[in-house]
Amino acid sequence: MLAPVELTEGAGWQRRKLSPGQADALDASEVAQVRQRRADGTCEVKDNALVGTVRLGSGEDTFEVRIRPKVTIRRLLFLLGYAQDRGRWFEDEVQAAEEPDLLPAVAAAFARTASRALAHGVPRGYRQVDAALPVLRGRLRESAQLRQRSGVMFPLEVRYDERTVDTAENRLLLAATRSLLALAGVAPATAQELRRIAAALDGVAEPAHGPVKPPDWVPTRVNAPYHAALRLAETVLRSSSFEREDGETLRVDGFVVKMWEVFEDFVTHAVDEVLTHRGGEVRLQDRTHHLDEDRTLEMCPDLVLYRPEGPGGRMIPAVVLDAKYRLAIRQGARAHVYHQMIAYCARLGARQGWLVYAGSERADGQPGGRGDVIRSRIGGPTPIGLVTYVLDLRLPLAELRARIERIADDMVTPSV
């Protein structure tokens, strides 16, 4: 196996020495970008805002790509968990500082969380069973009895509920456990704990080979002790693939996290959590609006704040927010983002639009203070206020929370 290729997210173009096979496999994977290949084997490589560990190539040409996030592993786990468990503004006892990379940290966090959850016992549920029995159990399926047993008394076609461990929740936990056990890079102690979890889930249907879609489950008060483990299990399964630019979902041998999704989930859920105490109604990924009258061009802003207005206090869109992980530097690319926000606001009739970026640059793209704000005014019959806000994810949690609260407060007091 070839030596791993190690990159740092957001570090720009990094020079690395790669074999021709490594360069080809890395470029084709879209995990990173490759350019300027030289005769001595060096080339320039840049991440695609994916972090984690991926195994590429085959046979003797197999190698690993390890991309470390800009934020600490501990902070990344906090960001991953916040949208899953709203309102938790503290970094859990995941002890992520002990783990040098994301994969072993997530595996350890999942093993601890799942073990704690299963200490309450393996959750059980009921499944509906149709069977032919010599005695009545549950209720008789009369139509099936007449159709299949016409003129015969026994066996009886019945339907009954059976208590079982083979539930959607347990299938999700087992699928995540098996997925982590199949990956290189999981610490031996963590792997041992994962094997204990798999043994505790005996009787649960094994996941199918190949890509595994997280089983659907419904959060209830009954399965509340398992929520954290189930959310982490979903993260594990979804981090085994990513969507390419052409829309194709690429299965990867490893664990990758899409930082733009992490940032979008964190910002929208954190702002939503604050806005619930400020009045109005918040809709995330609001797909109820279209750009055209024929409703063929769907719009999907990350967050829309509705406020009461007019006779009867009818709820109307007041503010639109979009979370963008990377601040567009090129003027044309930045203009495109603003054009999209103006279209959102104009179509919805919103008076204010927020573009929240991740980073420590100034909102005008120049080096400078953290959290800088640029306010712009778009004239017209209904003026629109545009706010560009750069949010530094590396801030202490208390300050990060204060920035989120400031965004929410400004959203409910538009200044246009």
Image (cartoon, rainbow, N blue to C red):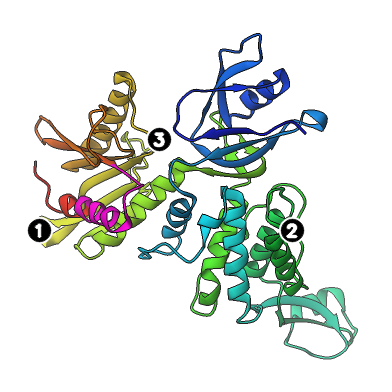
Q: Position of residue 114 (x, y in %)?
A: 61, 69
Name the image quarter holding residue 32. Answer: top right
Identify the residue at horizontal 51%, vertical 63% (top origin): 94
Left or right of 405 in this view: 49 = right
Mark identifier at residue 207: 2
Q: Position of residue 285 (x, y in %)?
A: 38, 48
Q: From the image, which quarter does the C terminus lie in?
A: top left
Judging depth in this view, the residue of 196 and 7 nearest the camera is: 7
Q: Earlier in the sequence, mark 1 or mark 3?
A: 3
Judging depth in this view, the residue of 409 and 16 nearest the camera is: 16
Query: Which residue position is annotated with label 1?
Result: 311
Q: Main secondary structure of the magenta part?
A: helix
Mark identifier at residue 296: 3
Amino acid type at mark 2: Pro
Mark identifier at residue 326: none
Asked if residue 392 lies in the magenta stretch, the reply is: yes
| Separation (CA) of disc 1 from disc 3 | 31 Å
Q: Nearer the viewer, mark 1 or mark 2?
A: 2
Q: Is residue 251 visible?
A: no
Left or right of 81 in this view: 368 = left
Q: Earlier in the sequence, mark 3 or mark 2?
A: 2
Tag 2: Cα neighbours inside 10 Å, few (<14), some, or many (≥20)? some
Part of the protein shown in magenta? 391-407
Q: From the image, which quarter does the N terminus lie in?
A: top right
Circle 3 SS class: loop
Amino acid type at mark 3: Thr
Q: Position of residue 373 (x, y in %)?
A: 19, 38
Circle 2 SS class: loop
Name the image quarter holding residue 362. Answer: top left
Q: Nearer the viewer, mark 3 or mark 2?
A: 2
